[in-house]
Amino acid sequence: MNVFPMLLIAVGVYNALAFLFPESLAGALVSVPLLSGRVLSVTTGELVICLAVLLLFVEIVKATRTGGATAIDHALSLVLFVVCLIEFLAVPALGTGTFMIITLLTLLDVIAGFTVSLSTARRDLMVGSA
């Protein structure tokens, strides 16, 4: 479970919804009245984006670990980004703004993961040599 890219959950949920229940992504799932008098309508796709953002946080926290499993985790995150990019560009059902944001979150996971790991490794190297 340590090397499992958590964003795969959000990508899997969106893929399942896009192919099995495509109409569920566009319609309002819940409406919340705001103090301003406006009503916030939230779609299923927007909820999947919220899930993806929360999972991205988990991925960034996981990136602070050190060890051999971290490299595998980063490699799998990179594979997930490439798969999402190909799906976004080639699969009509996934060529949406919502999936584009999810794809960008997977890219951010890759960049943040490598950046945090390099920073952690540099800090460990400096502490070890002191």
Image (tube, helix red, strand yellow):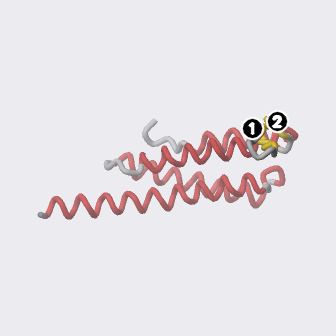
Q: What amino acid is found at the position of numbered circle 2 in the picture?
A: Leu
**Helix or strand or loop: what does disc 2 sit on?**
helix
Q: What amino acid is found at the position of numbered circle 1 in the picture?
A: Ala
Neighbour class for label 1 at 10 Å: few (<14), some, many (≥20)? Answer: few
The answer to whether mark 1 and mark 2 are in CB contact below 8 A is yes
Task: Choose top left, top right, bottom left or bottom right for residue 86.
Answer: bottom right
Mark sitting on residue 83: none
Mark sitting on residue 20: 2
Task: Choose top left, top right, bottom left or bottom right for residue 18.
Answer: top right
Neighbour class for label 2 at 10 Å: few (<14), some, many (≥20)? Answer: few
Residue sticking out furthest to the left: 130
Q: Is residue 113 left or right of residue 103?
A: left
Name the one closer to the observer, 53 or 7: 53
Query: Taking 36 as reference, is 82 above or below it?
Result: below
Residue holding disc 1: 16
Query: Taking 8 as reference, is 128 above or below it?
Result: below
Q: Which residue is drawn at 78% across and 58% down?
A: 90
Q: In this view, does 130 lie to the left or right of 40?
A: left
